[in-house]
Structure formats: structure tokens, C-alpha cells
Amino acid sequence: MHARTLVLRFPAEIVDKPIITHLVKDYNLTFNILKAQIYPRKEGMLVLELRGNRRDFQKGIKYLRDAGVQIEPVAQGIRRDDERCYQCGACTAVCPTGALHIRRPEMAVLFESERCSACELCVKTCPVRAMIVTFDKALAM
Amino acid sequence: MNSCRFNTVVEFMSAWNGSAREFILETSRAISASSVFKCRNTFREGVRPSGGPDAVHPMQKRVQETMGAVQKSYQEINEKIRKGQAVVVTAEEMVGILRKKGPARAAREVDVVTTGTFAPMCSSGVFLNFGHTQPPIKAGKVWLNDVPVFAGLAAVDIYLGVTEPSLDDPLNKVRPGTFEYGGGHVVQDLVAGKTVVLRAEGYGTDCYPNRSVEMTMTLDDFNYAVLCNPRNGYQNYNCAVNLSEKTIYTYMGTLKPRMGNANYSTSGQLSPLLNDPYYRTMGLGTRIFLGGAQGYVVWHGSQHNPGVARLPNGIPRAPAGTLMVLGDLKQMSPRWLVGVSILGYGCSLSVGLGIPIPVLDEELAVQAGVSDEDIVTQVKDYSFTRAEPLCEVTYAQLKSGTITVEGREIPTVPLSSYVRAKEIAELLKEWILKGEFLLGEPQHMLPTASRRNKAVEETANEVPLA
């Protein structure tokens, strides 16, 4: 089983097409939508976790690309500023996926971007604003 | 116990009703407080007693032989530091040393134990003097980067408090407010060498005719900048949970409903005041690590409350002692003074604080070797649903990642950075080993608690003396 959390960007021309429906029906994949948004200029953005066997997964990704969807891993849009982060651990109270967690007994606070669902709860919980989300800012204006 | 009441060892012994082990500790303390020890100190300072350079008072010699009591002075330890011979360990390392070697050897071999803590400390701020302007102003209202500061001092003296939000902050109008910029952030910007905009207004007098000024300044442009924190380094603090049905946003962080998480905020076994629970080495003049530079303890802090219930090892079971600390802001660093925004609560400043504890005797060796298993705190509800504490937990449990409260497993969340606390203890150790940092002997001690208060006796059977 292959699983990845991806950020999909839909240009305005294809935002009304049933792309995800085809992805699921034709490529035997399951998905979990974590976030969906349509911006003022009609571009769409979807954060979803996609699962299936590796072959189906690769074919599905090809289908999405051919349909005009831009794909990037969620990790590309969320990062931690390690200069700012002083490793207190306050963020671990709200992180729903355990992407932010503590390595014991050292008490080091770790961020595993592959496990991040882009919920952004950590962004305002972090007292020094060390968590930076950029993937939905580019299209927001 | 006031050791001076007893004129002879025999009288002291006959009045004693504690355990043999406590007797040894009490005796060594009584002797250090007596004239015998003072005479030895005089000798160290250069006045030779009649018995020649090796003379030791017979009574002290006997105690050393029979009980192996270790007694060191600040002068002795500082001399070792100067010569590069002092043995310095962090409070974390001391835990293992004490376990392996026992109190007597640990006290003989280790000279200084370094501690550290790094967390938001709201009762912090900076005294600044921005210099007389031309024409001069008696500033009545002052803002730094639009953060109001206190100007009710002499003409151009101000106090910048770290929890002050900026003038146009929406606060909690839409909950939870995010408090993006405040006094703590101004402090960090100043130590980072950034420019800040100072605005001042005055009502105008014959001697101070100017009514308003605005200028861009860096920390170097201020004549005087002293970090002066009325309450830092709280000795122990509550573990916070939320019993209500809604998420709450507190100074103890975000607390999810129905005890979704349990937040705590001390560095436990590395925490300064938990390693010297009766403040025997702390007072006016104790030299410390503060904000990345050398600073001082100047007084006990606000809300200092040494009289809370304690474990037999001296550890207070609830928030107890606090410190007022001071240091030159111009020497400090933005790595160790960090402006913070606490969701729904407000702005603050995370302060790096570290205190070296001289191992003057066995009792201090035992206390500075305290481990997370031997430190407890109360789990308290922050939603005003229940007033009394829910239970007591150890820091070892808190640091394991979950605690069990009323039969339920609750994930724990630290707000105090253990990683940075350890870095401070290591840095302080390095400074002392290099001979750059000497111990400051306190000139006036903090108010402390009686060693054998009622609460200790009540629980004396539960936990053995460390």
C-alpha cells in the first residue's frame, strides 16, 4: 500500500471538472480530503492523502498531471523555521497527526513533514511562529 | 531548626528526634554555622590561628573523621575555578553522580552544579534611559514600536514590560487573539540590534519645553538598558488541564476539553530552585546566567512563597520560591531572550536563566542531585470547573509523555524547553570551567522555610530522604 499527502492545484479552466471522481473510479485509489479551497480567481487547491498500490498510484498521478493538475508534496508548503523554534513542545498539544512530536528522553521537538495534514493548528499555537505555511498563500490574493 | 540554640554537641544530640541520617546533615549544618567554622574561614582569608597553617579545630576534625562531613566555602571553590581545577557538572549529570558515588563522595568531588531553564517568564522587563533630547522633554507617555511603556519615572527613564501588547492589537476581541507583537518582542528586537521607533509625549514644563519626539534607535543608542525581572525562575509550577467542554487558551498554553492534554512548564531536575530547595546558596549577589550574559539575583521575586507543603527532600509540592533577577541588557542575546505570543492570552518573553549551585556540603550535593522522579507537582483544572487539585504527579511521569488522571491516560505537553535548559546548564558549566565565571557569594539570603515544617512530617513516611 502506497500513501502520500499531496497538495493539488487546479487551474481555473479545470476546477469544475470531476477529476477526483475519475481518479478514484478508474485507478482504484482511496483518498482522504484534508483541506479544499477555491480562490477568488477560481483556482482550486486540495490537500489530500492518496492511497493505493504503487502501480495504481503512479498511474493516478500521471492522470492528474495530464488533466492539468499541478502536484506537490505537502511538505513543500509547510516547514519549520529551526532558527526560531526553541523546542518547547507547545505545538504537540494541537497537532492531530503526530507530525510534531517529542523524542524522549532528550525532549527534542521533531517535525516530520510527511505526517503533516496541513491543518495549520500549530501555526498560531507556536509562541514564536516557527511553523510556516506557504502553499495556500500564493493563490490567496 | 536554629542550630545556634545548642551550646554543645551533646545538648544538640539529646534534643534530636530525627533519623540518624538527618542527624548527620543537621550536625554538619550546625557546625558550619558555629564559631568553629567561622574561625576556619578567617584562617582562609589570611589570619592564621595559633596552631600553624594546618591547624583545624579539634571538634571539626572529629566530625570530619567520624562523619566525613564535607565543608567548602565560596572562596575555596572560586580559587579552584581560577586555577582551572573546579569540578563542574550539570544538574542532569549530578543525578547519576549522586546515585553512583553517594552524598559524601559526590560532595567531595563535585564543586559546582549548573542548572538552567528556558520558558516564558511574564514578570520581566527592561529599564531604559533614552537620553535627553534637544530641547528636552519630560516624557509622560512613551511607545517603543507602538508598544506602550511605563514613563512615570524621571524625564527620559522608562520601563518596558514584556506582556504589554502593541497599541493597535485587537487583543481578545475575536477569541483567541494572536498577540503578534508586544513588549517581549521589543526586547528581542533590541538585543538583536534591530532599530525600534521611540515616540514620546510630554505636557511641557519650563525646564522641559518639548512636547513630543519621535526617533529611531538601536540598543546602542540607549544610555542605559537593564533587564530587571521582578519574578523569574518559579520553583515548581502547576500542571494544567481543562475539565470543561470547550478548548481554553491560557498562559499554560492551549488546553483541549475533557482533559485532552496536560501542560506543564518547568525544566524539572534542571530547574534552578528545585536544585537548592531551601535557597541556601541564593540571595543578593548570586551570579547567574541571564539572557545569555552574566546577571545577578537581587532579591526574592514577587509571590515568593517558601512556606508551601514540601516533600521530605525539600521539594515544594506547589509553586513556591521565585527570584528577582537583573543584568545588563546590552550584553544579552536574542537567542536567550525571545518574544512570544501565547494564543488567546497575550505577549511575553522567554527568558534563559541558569544558576550555578556551589556544593558546599553533602546536603547540597543531595539536593542538587535531585531527579525527575523525586519532584512532584499538582494537576490543576484551569477551566474553573474544579478548584482543588486533581492529583499529584512526578516530573518523570510528565516527561514520559502521558500521565494517568482519574483512570484516564492524558498526553502531556511541555511549555518549557528542556533542550534549551540543558544548553544553558552546559554553557554555564563551560564558562565556569574556562574561569570566565566566578561564583557570587550572596550578601543577603532569600526568605526560606523551616526545614521540618508540618507538611514534611505528615508525609515523612511516604518518601525516604533522598
Image (spheres, rainbow, N blue to C red):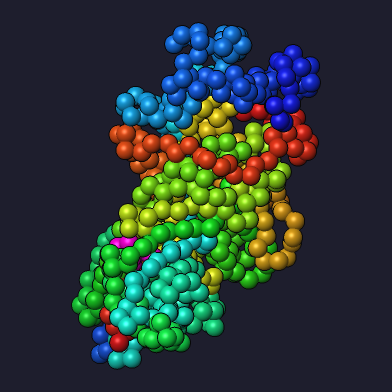
- Name which residue lies at 34% across and 74% down: B132
What percent of the width, then of the height, locates residue B429?
A: 37, 36
A90 with respect to B319 (left or right): left
**Which quadrant of the structure image shows residue B196?**
bottom left
Q: Is residue A121 visible?
A: no
Q: Is residue B190 magenta?
A: yes
Q: In the rendered structure, which segment of residues is drawn in magenta?
A: B187-192
- Name which residue lies at 47% across and 75% down: B151
**Which quadrant of the structure image shows residue B46?**
top left
- Name which residue lies at 51% across and 39% down: B442
Name the one closer to the observer, B7 or B459.
B7
- Name which residue lies at 48% across and 71% down: B153
What percent of the width, then of the height, locates residue A71?
A: 25, 72
Q: Is residue B314 visible?
A: yes
Characterize the magenta stretch by its predominant secondary structure.
helix
Name the one closer to the observer, B295 or B362.
B295
Q: For the N terminus of chain B, which image quadrant?
A: top right
A41 with respect to B48 (left or right): left
B388 with respect to B197 (left or right): right
What percent of the width, then of the height, locates residue B439?
A: 42, 36
Q: For the C terminus of chain B, which image quadrant?
A: top right
Name the one closer to the observer, B153 or B91.
B153
Which residue reaches farthest front? B206
